Image (cartoon, rainbow, N blue to C red):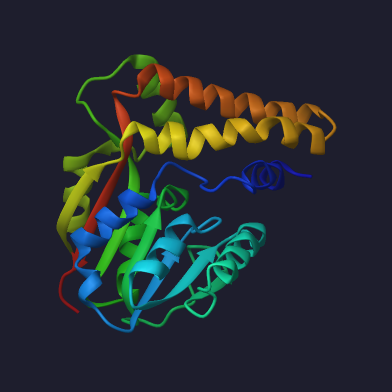
Amino acid sequence: MDETALLVDLHRDTPRQGPGGDEQTRLAIALSGLAAGRNLSIADIGCGTGASTLVLARDLDAGITAVDLFATFLDKLAAAAEREGLGDRISPVCAPMEALPFADASLDAIWSEGAIYAMGFVEGIRAWRRFLKPGGILAVSELTWLTLERPDELTAHWMHEYPQVDTAAAKMAQLEDAGYAPLGYFVLPEQCWRDHYYGPLQASFADFLARHDQSAAARAAVASAKAEIDLYERFAGFFSYGFYVAQKRGA
């Protein structure tokens, strides 16, 4: 099993593959104004096992196309959707976010929680804009600095892992430059990291290692996850995910 497949397997049984929460998804929905819409067409990009997808399907009058690169995650989402009676509202699609299968100006909203980093924030918001109808909504959560000054260790880590990390002010300016009007912004609270993401991930380590017979590669994957968790515990006051809600300007 290669490194990517191993990471997918590590995260396959967790409810979220990144920080987030149902309450925060609903806050973004409120900021977006989508609740007033009818027969909406929404794409959830990089949906993982579908925590946000399920909230969108429950709370909105919409058909949700749930896009992820990994079929394992989409299978989990499809099963959860059927259990909740939402199978007719959610259409899983296995595809890369760089090659989305949508017609221009066909979507009322694009949602992406904790995933746009895989493409890059600037690249993603620019590439996806054409799929939105005029006035369509973009709602994404993105790694964001919470302070102007930070410990050197933290800055070095994230500049290596994700050089597009920046302040909310910079992200808002990037949205405006890409043809969006920002509608709202908020920071994910610590519970979205500790309780909703890292807690379930830590609880899965033992079963994951057992499935892979304590292999060196599996132990390395767990060690990497533990190092990320340690970084967050030491520096949580300096960074988080910011949730950005914006509206497409013009055609």
Which residue lies most toward the front here?
Answer: 84
Q: Quadrant of residue 145?
A: top left
Q: Nearer the viewer, residue 241 or 122?
A: 241
Q: Nearer the viewer, residue 27 or 98?
A: 27
Q: Is residue 78 left or right of residue 29?
A: right
Q: Is residue 72 left or right of residue 199?
A: right
Residue sitting at 19 percent across and 25 percent down? 148
5 versus 133 height, above or below? above
Q: Nearer the viewer, residue 123 or 214?
A: 214
Q: How many marks?
A: 0
179 versus 103 height, above or below? above
Which residue lies most toward the right here?
Answer: 213
Q: Position of residue 155 (x, y in %)?
A: 35, 23
The N terminus - image quarter = top right
Residue sitting at 40 percent across and 83 percent down? 103
Q: Is residue 168 left or right of residue 235?
A: left
Q: Can see residue 224?
A: yes
122 versus 249 height, above or below? above
The C terminus - image quarter = bottom left
Residue sitting at 40 percent across and 68 percent down? 58
Q: Can see residue 246?
A: no
Q: Position of residue 43 (x, y in %)?
A: 41, 70
3 versus 141 height, above or below? above
Residue sitting at 70 percent across and 41 percent down? 3
Q: Quadrant of residue 128?
A: bottom left
Q: Position of residue 25 (x, y in %)?
A: 33, 54
Q: Nearer the viewer, residue 226 or 194?
A: 194
Q: Position of residue 20 (x, y in %)?
A: 40, 45
